């Protein structure tokens, strides 16, 4: 049987079980092909689960010719590459000052160059790559990145910006290749590339020292690799099959290594893989051993390899950042002991807490601070007018406390007794000699908690100064180990627990952190403390190096700290925040630089024509799928062209719609502060879906007109689309490349008349 006959046979026999006994696809196949699998050219003879033609080829593998290697593809690809790189690298050094979040990620790149430890709510890969790019292009890590607007002057910042711009330039290229594989249509791929190349939002977000272009690079690389891997289904376990499987795993590790939203692309690839394995399981021509090989290969390539790479990223992160820095205070005392320059590094002290010791007590919540007191009293009207007790974020002499037995008159000689789980103690502030004290007065800020004060003189107070030591997870008699033991202090008189609320006190409290006594006894980091400094001349010292946490401990702690920090993010002063429903309609942008007519202004806002086309596509796509589904279900006789469009629409479009949903819908459930730029990964999938949807829509003009008029209408539609995108880019390109002079609503502005929505602020 000739190749064309084999294709015709498959088109008659089909691979869709829901269409069995129909005129279009009568059943002859036992299994389903993945709905996410692009149709492509066969490379071997038989692929599992597909109709076997008489010439030994697998019909679905032949159902479409792979156009990705056609000469027109190479020409169009070079055009896409040229336009993408030129639009992103144009004016890359402008403005020559810090813009928006460059103050964070540029500074973090400097920390890597200087090997200084810091804290961030995101995994480290993106910042590591920024630091590496800066180092490789001559940046020495000395620019302070204090605030937006600071001039770079003689510092080599262009390398870090250029690195992000290059990765951002790959996004339209990847999108072009993905849509080309899914649709086998040059025009669909080109529409997608045009939408992304001439979108002012993607240009802006790619031109600065940010994590977003790095994240989106790995997301799109993962999608492209996944689609390419699916194309190799006709030659399992061949070299190219393994190559695309491994590249998918590497890209997944990269996406998660930049931001935790990389979990969304992992979920997309995981769903596709589950469907693929389910299809293989239903293929009776495969033995269970062959199915097991497929399963194990995917476990290695898509689970074990990304996990290994992800852990390796953190291993490099910890090795490089080995000097004490601004991130120390976010982590436990044991974690800090491994940092060169920290007072705990290579220090020695008694291993177990004892009576008579001088200690510092650190709260375990993020920025919980050290237990602290000073001579100042609580003001009138704020509980009892007694000495303030706070949590202070920095090391200070007023953080020192003395550990005493509950009996103030009891003395000891010789080797001091060790403090154990269940013991009742007093904590005396060393500088002021007042005891840590609790009572039923209302706390200053957390009104449902009780006030904690300093009370008494020279260690003499009352029964409200007594606290029971509780080692978390311990039993009566367990010792309290410095650095490592998590300890709670239960107030004997009221039954509450010592607590750091994380709230900042007013100026009368020197803007330190509120300490309360919480009646809610659930174990939380806010109620857990550890002993950091421990001084007792009567006890032998040990080197703290023996108490240093091992790699898995610091890996786990870093993730706990990042997750807590992420959930607690709050908007900066005067910063625009947004809601998820704002994003698809392009409701509000972000100021990257400048606010008035005397400054160089850059405003992150998508090309409105592109974004509103994507919004229309999201509404149009389910309508088109519904029409196609009804036609197929009713058994209408469709042409070969209509069948191909239906397959592309439901398979390729279904994958992209799922990708959009996975990268967008979860933000509705998040409690943290959200910003406009969070939508851009979802926008990539939306733009690719628009390319496929509009291409099929324009190719369906023969439903209303006959050739050649339908062809002319199709070409006219394509020209209108291209002109609309290009002209809107011409109008709005100053948003990306910089605006000066009057604002849009002022006379003489170059952006006059372009403020189409009142919420736009340029």
Image (cartoon, rainbow, N blue to C red):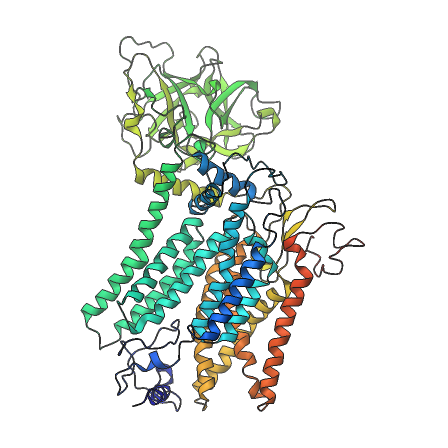
> Residue 516 at what x, y percent from top left?
49, 29
Q: Is residue 479 above or below residue 182?
A: above
Q: Residue at x 49, y 14 (%)?
A: 432
Query: Residue lying furthest right in this view?
Result: 747
The residue lying at 74 percent from left, 47 percent from top is: 597
Judged left or right of residue 120, residue 304 is left
Task: Specify whether 118 is left or right of 729.
Answer: left
**In this view of the protein, can residue 523 be seen by the observer?**
no
Residue 96 visible to an observer of this rendering: yes
Q: Position of residue 514 (x, y in %)?
A: 52, 30
Tell whether 725 sits left or right of 434: right
Q: Is residue 478 left or right of residue 368?
A: left
Residue 684, horizontal then vertical, whole percent: 51, 62
Query: How many numbered marks appear?
Result: 0
Residue 588 percent across, percent down from the top left: 64, 55
- Looking at the image, which is closer to me, 364 or 607? 607
Q: Quick one: quadrant of the N terminus?
A: bottom left
Between 347 and 62, the one lying in front of the other is: 62
Frontmost residue, 566 versus 43: 43
Residue occupying image coordinates x 26% and y 12%: 415
Q: Which image quadrant for residue 118?
A: top left
Question: Quick check: 2 above or below 84?
Answer: below
* Above-or-below relation of 520 to 458: below
Q: Residue at x 30, y 70 (%)?
A: 278
Q: Please name whichever residue, 131 or 565, is drawn nearer the observer in this view of the structure.
A: 131
């Amino acid at each position: 049987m000739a190749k064309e006959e084999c294709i015709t046979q498959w088109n008659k026999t089909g691979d869709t079980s829901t269409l069995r006994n129909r005129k279009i696809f009568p059943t002859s196949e036992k299994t389903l092909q993945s709905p996410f699998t692009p149709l492509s050219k066969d490379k071997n003879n038989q692929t599992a689960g597909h109709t076997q033609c008489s010439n030994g080829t697998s019909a679905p593998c032949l159902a479409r010719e792979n156009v990705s290697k056609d000469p027109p593809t190479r020409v169009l690809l070079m055009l896409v590459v040229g336009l993408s790189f030129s639009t992103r690298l144009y004016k890359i050094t402008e403005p020559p000052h810090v813009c928006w979040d460059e103050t964070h990620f540029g500074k973090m790149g400097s920390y890597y160059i200087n090997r200084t430890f810091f804290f961030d709510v995101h995994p480290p890969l993106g910042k590591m790559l920024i630091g590496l790019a800066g180092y490789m292009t001559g940046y020495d890590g000395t620019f302070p990145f204090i605030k937006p607007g600071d001039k770079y002057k003689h510092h080599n910042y262009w390398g870090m910006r250029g690195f992000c711009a290059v990765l951002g330039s790959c996004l339209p290229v990847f999108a072009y290749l993905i849509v080309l594989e899914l649709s086998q249509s040059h025009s669909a791929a080109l529409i997608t590339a045009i939408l992304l190349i001439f979108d002012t939002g993607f240009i802006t977000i790619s031109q600065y020292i940010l994590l977003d272009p790095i994240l989106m690079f790995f997301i799109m690389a993962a999608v492209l690799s996944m689609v390419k891997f699916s194309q190799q289904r006709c030659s399992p376990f061949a070299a190219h099959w393994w190559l695309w499987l491994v590249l998918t795993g590497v890209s997944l590790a990269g996406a998660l290594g930049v931001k935790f939203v990389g979990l969304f692309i992992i979920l997309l690839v995981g769903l596709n893989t589950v469907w693929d394995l389910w299809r293989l399981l239903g293929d009776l021509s495969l033995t269970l051993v062959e199915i097991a090989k497929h399963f194990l290969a995917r476990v290695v390539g898509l689970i074990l390899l990304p996990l290994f790479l992800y852990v390796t990223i953190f291993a490099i992160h910890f090795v490089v950042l080995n000097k004490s820095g601004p991130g120390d205070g976010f982590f436990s005392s044991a974690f800090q002991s491994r940092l060169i320059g920290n007072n705990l590094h290579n220090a020695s002290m008694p291993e177990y807490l004892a009576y008579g010791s001088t200690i510092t007590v650190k709260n375990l919540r993020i920025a919980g601070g050290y237990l602290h007191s000073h001579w100042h009293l609580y003001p009138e009207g704020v509980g009892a007018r007694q000495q303030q007790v706070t949590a202070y974020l920095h090391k200070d002499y007023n953080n020192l406390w003395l550990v005493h037995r509950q009996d103030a008159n009891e003395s000891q000689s010789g080797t001091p007794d060790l403090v154990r789980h269940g013991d009742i103690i007093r904590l005396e502030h060393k500088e002021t000699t007042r005891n840590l004290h609790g009572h039923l007065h209302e706390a200053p800020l957390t009104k449902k908690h009780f006030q904690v004060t300093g009370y008494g003189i020279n260690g003499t107070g009352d029964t409200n100064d007594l606290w029971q030591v509780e080692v978390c997870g311990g039993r009566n008699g367990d010792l309290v180990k410095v650095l490592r033991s998590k300890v709670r202090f239960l107030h004997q008189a009221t039954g509450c627990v010592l607590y750091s609320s994380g709230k900042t006190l007013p100026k009368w409290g020197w803007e330190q952190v509120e300490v309360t006594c919480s009646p809610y006894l659930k174990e939380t980091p806010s109620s857990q403390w550890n002993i950091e400094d421990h001084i007792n001349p009567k006890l032998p010292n040990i080197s703290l190096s023996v108490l240093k946490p091992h790699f898995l401990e610091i890996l786990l702690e870093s993730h706990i700290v990042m997750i807590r920090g992420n959930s607690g993010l709050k908007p900066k002063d005067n910063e625009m925040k947004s809601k998820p429903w704002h994003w698809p309609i392009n409701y509000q942008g972000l100021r990257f630089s400048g606010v008035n007519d005397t400054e160089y202004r850059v405003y992150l806002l998508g090309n409105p024509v592109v974004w509103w086309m994507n919004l229309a596509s999201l509404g149009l796509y389910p309508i088109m799928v519904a029409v196609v589904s009804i036609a197929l279900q009713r058994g209408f006789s469709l042409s070969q062209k209509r069948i191909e469009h239906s397959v592309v629409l439901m398979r390729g479009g279904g994958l992209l719609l799922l990708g959009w949903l996975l990268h967008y819908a979860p933000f509705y459930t998040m409690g943290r502060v959200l910003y406009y730029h969070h939508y851009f990964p979802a926008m990539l999938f939306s733009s690719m879906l628009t390319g496929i949807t509009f291409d099929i829509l324009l190719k369906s003009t023969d439903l209303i007109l006959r050739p050649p008029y339908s062809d002319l209408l199709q070409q006219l539609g394509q020209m209108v689309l291209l002109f609309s995108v290009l002209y809107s880019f011409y109008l709005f390109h100053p948003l990306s490349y910089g605006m000066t002079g009057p604002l849009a609503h002022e006379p003489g502005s170059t952006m006059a008349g372009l403020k189409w929505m009142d919420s736009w602020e340029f």
